[in-house]
Structure formats: structure tokens, C-alpha cells
Image (cartoon, helix red, strand yellow):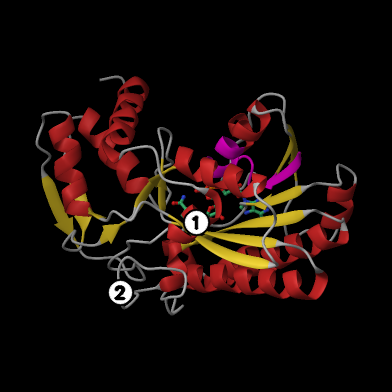
């Protein structure tokens, strides 16, 4: 399979690129390196340093293509930054996404997958939330992600490009960046290792559906191997388990047998209160189930922080 991964120098895109490479696919990573780093692109994979908003994107892709799969993971994914500068968010996450979808169509890509987010649901009326829940994003980031889905749906119908949107929960892994939706895990791990307390914004009862990046990769590979949907489908990719920030802190403290001192500061705006998603549509389509349990995932994060910060 020939695969183009936008955002291939990022956390999820880099992990996905490695998994495609390891099973023998030909992979090209495209990334502007605005937050990604070239060293995150696994060996043996060409990194094309380009911006997804570039009007010459079709020519850039054509010179390496055609691709059976365009896996669109490039984005500005900082919810708080998007609140401060919604236009910058929309420029990349809406206009850039539109540019990628059009370039995929123009270069004859076999199909496109797109990293959307649980943020499209905002604060939904029921849990676990399935894909038919009302779409009422409460942040510019969530609005941008849904706009990307709508463009995907449009081009799937109008131009026959099969499109799959993944609505990810909060993705964590051994090397979760601190400036990430699951950055709280990386920050807690660093502070645990340093013997410091942690700051929780608001009451800490806000919950997230944490899903391990290896399970995100497995979902991508399962969809890549299944027949293309007809013509657009959105899948939740999450565990169905919600964890509050307070519980996360006490749980991580318990894992290292070292209770954490927690200090509370004012809540941040634009963040959803609860997230717990139902991924049974993806399970029915591909057999996917999450395989990494939260505890072993967290232990690996803490071990990596110990190695990195040396305690
Ligand atoms: N991490 C999560 O918890 C999470 C949850 C839901 C959805 N997502 C989505 O998954 C995708 C990957 O997220 P991630 O956590 O790996 O983020 P990341 O920041 O590590 O990776 C995003 C990559 O996109 C690149 N990029 C940004 N703007 C670009 C542009 N204009 N042109 C080309 N490249 C550009 C960055 O340099 C970076 O390497 C994003 O679309 C994000 O919105 C992530």
C-alpha cells in the first residue's frame, strides 16, 4: 500500500508512519514541522517538508504519488490556542484540510482518512456518546474539525473519494507531548518523577476518554485494510471509559506509591466537561477493540519520564 501521512512528524502521525512501514507499506510523511520534529519521522520514510495550505500541494503530492491512502493528521491541535486565535486554527484545520482533500481528489488517491476529534460533540446530552449524537462543538477547534468532516463528506459524494473520519478520544502514549490533549498525563509523569505536586485546573472532575496511541494506530490499520466505506463514514475511536483529572492524579500517584500533592487553579475556558464515547460502530465494521489497558499505558509513560528526567 502507498500511504501519504500528513502530520507524519507529529505524535500520532509519526507512530502511524512507523506501523505502516513495519508492515511493508511505502510511506511518505508530509509535515511543515511547525510543532512536529523531523526526528519523529521513522527511518526509511521520506519526509516532505511542506505546508498543507500550499496551493501547490497537488503537484507536491503528484510528484510522489499516486497514493492508495492519504491519511490526514496534520493540524493545529491546541484547543486553548484556538480559543485565543480562532482564525489561525481555521486557516490550518479548515482551509488546510480542504486543500488536502482537494489534492487527494486531484491526484487520484484511493481514499482519505481524517483525524477528527471528540471535540465535535461539545458537551453531549448522553454517555457513552455515539456517532449519531448531536454535533454541537463548544470550541473553535471542534468547529474546525467538524468543518473538515463536512468537506470530506461533500467530496466523497461529489467526487467519489471514499472518506473516513476518526473521532479520537484523548490520545496518550509513552511519548505524549506535554502540549497535547493528553498532555496532562505527560505533565503529571514529569512532576511525579521530580517529586513535585501537580496543578489541576478547575475542580478536576472533568473527564476524558483516554485511548492509547497504539490502539489509534490499530484502528487506522484496520480501516485501511477494510473495503472503503460508501462513501463517507465517521468512527469514534475511544475506550468507553471516562477518567476524571482528579482520579488520574491519584491513580498515577498510587502507581508509584507516592501520593501526589494537588493544587487547584481557575478552570480553563472552552474545555468540555465530560467525554466518554461508544466505539461500537468501528467494532462492527472492523472488529477493532482497544487493547492497551490504562494502567500499563500509564506505567510506560512514568518509566519514560524517569528515563528522560533522570530520577
Ligand atoms: N492527540 C490527541 O489527543 C488528539 C485527539 C483528537 C484528535 N487529534 C488529531 O489527531 C491529529 C494528530 O494529532 P497529534 O496529537 O499527533 O498532534 P501533533 O501536533 O503531534 O501532530 C500534528 C502535526 O501536524 C503538523 N502540522 C501542523 N500544521 C501544519 C501545516 N499547516 N502543514 C503541514 N503540517 C502541519 C505539525 O508540525 C505536527 O507534526 C491532529 O489532526 C489532531 O487534531 C489528536
Q: Count how many numbered circles sit on residues in the image.
A: 2
Residue 184 lies, in percent from the top left, at 31, 47
If the image is split into quadrants, where does the C terminus sit? top left
Indicate whether 48 appears above or below 163: above
Where is residue 176, by image quadrant?
Answer: top left
231 vs 220, left or right, is: right
Residue 19 lies, in percent from the top left, at 60, 33
If the image is split into quadrants, where does the N terminus sit? top right
Which of the two labelled residues, at mark 1 and mark 2, occupies the earlier sequence position? 2
Neighbour tally class for label 1: few under 14, some 14-19, many 20 plus, Cα within 10 Å:
few
Whether residue 165 is visible here, answered yes or no, is yes
Magenta range: 1-16
Where is residue 302, by image quadrant?
Answer: top left
Residue 163 lies, in percent from the top left, at 68, 62
Q: Which of the numbered marks, if any, corresponds to residue 270?
A: none
129 vs 219, left or right, is: left
Quick one: 237 or 98, which is closer to the camera? 237
230 vs 193, left or right, is: right
Cα–Cα span, label 1 and label 2: 21 Å
Q: Secondary structure at mark 2?
A: loop
Residue 187 counted in the magenta span: no
Tags 1 and 2 in contact by the CB under 8 Å rule? no
Residue placed under numbered mark 1 in the picture: 284
Residue placed under numbered mark 2 in the picture: 126
Q: Secondary structure at mark 1?
A: helix
Where is residue 304, by image quadrant?
Answer: top left
Whether residue 84 is visible here, answered yes or no, is no
Amino acid at each position: 500500500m502507498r500511504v501519504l501521512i500528513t502530520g507524519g512528524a507529529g505524535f500520532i502521525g509519526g507512530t502511524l508512519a512507523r506501523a505502516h512501514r513495519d508492515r511493508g507499506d511505502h510511506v511518505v510523511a508530509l509535515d511543515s514541522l511547525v510543532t512536529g520534529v523531523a526526528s519523529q519521522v521513522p527511518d526509511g520514510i521520506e519526509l516532505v517538508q511542506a505546508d498543507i495550505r500550499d496551493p501547490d500541494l497537488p503537484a507536491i503530492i503528484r510528484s510522489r504519488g499516486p497514493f492508495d491512502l492519504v491519511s490526514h493528521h496534520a493540524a493545529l491541535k491546541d484547543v486553548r490556542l484556538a480559543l485565543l486565535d480562532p482564525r489561525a486554527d481555521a486557516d490550518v484545520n479548515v482551509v488546510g484540510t480542504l486543500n488536502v482533500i482537494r489534492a487527494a481528489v486531484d491526484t487520484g488517491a484511493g481514499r482519505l482518512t481524517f483525524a477528527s476529534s471528540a471535540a465535535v460533540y461539545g458537551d453531549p446530552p448522553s454517555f457513552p456518546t455515539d456517532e449519531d449524537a448531536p454535533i454541537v462543538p463548544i470550541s473553535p477547534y471542534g468547529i474546525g474539525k467538524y468543518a473538515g468532516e463536512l468537506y470530506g463528506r461533500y467530496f466523497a459524494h461529489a467526487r467519489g473519494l471514499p472518506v473516513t473520519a476518526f473521532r479520537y478520544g484523548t490520545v496518550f502514549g509513552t511519548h505524549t507531548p506535554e502540549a497535547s490533549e493528553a498532555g496532562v498525563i505527560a505533565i503529571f509523569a514529569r512532576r511525579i518523577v521530580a517529586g513535585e505536586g501537580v496543578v489541576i485546573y478547575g475542580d478536576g472532575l472533568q473527564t476524558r476518554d483516554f485511548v492509547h496511541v497504539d490502539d489509534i494506530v490499530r484502528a487506522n490499520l484496520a480501516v485501511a485494510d477494510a473495503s472503503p466505506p460508501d462513501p463517507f463514514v465517521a468512527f469514534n475511536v475511544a475506550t468507553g471509559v471516562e477518567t476524571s483529572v482528579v482520579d488520574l492524579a491519584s491513580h498515577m500517584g498510587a502507581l508509584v506509591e507516592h501520593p501526589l500533592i494537588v493544587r487547584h487553579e481557575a478552570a480553563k475556558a472552552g474545555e468540555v466537561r465530560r467525554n466518554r464515547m461508544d466505539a461500537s460502530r468501528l467494532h462492527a465494521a472492523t472488529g477493532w477493540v482497544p487493547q492497551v489497558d490504562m494502567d500499563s499505558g500509564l506505567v510506560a509513560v512514568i518509566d519514560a519520564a524517569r528515563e528522560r528526567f533522570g530520577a
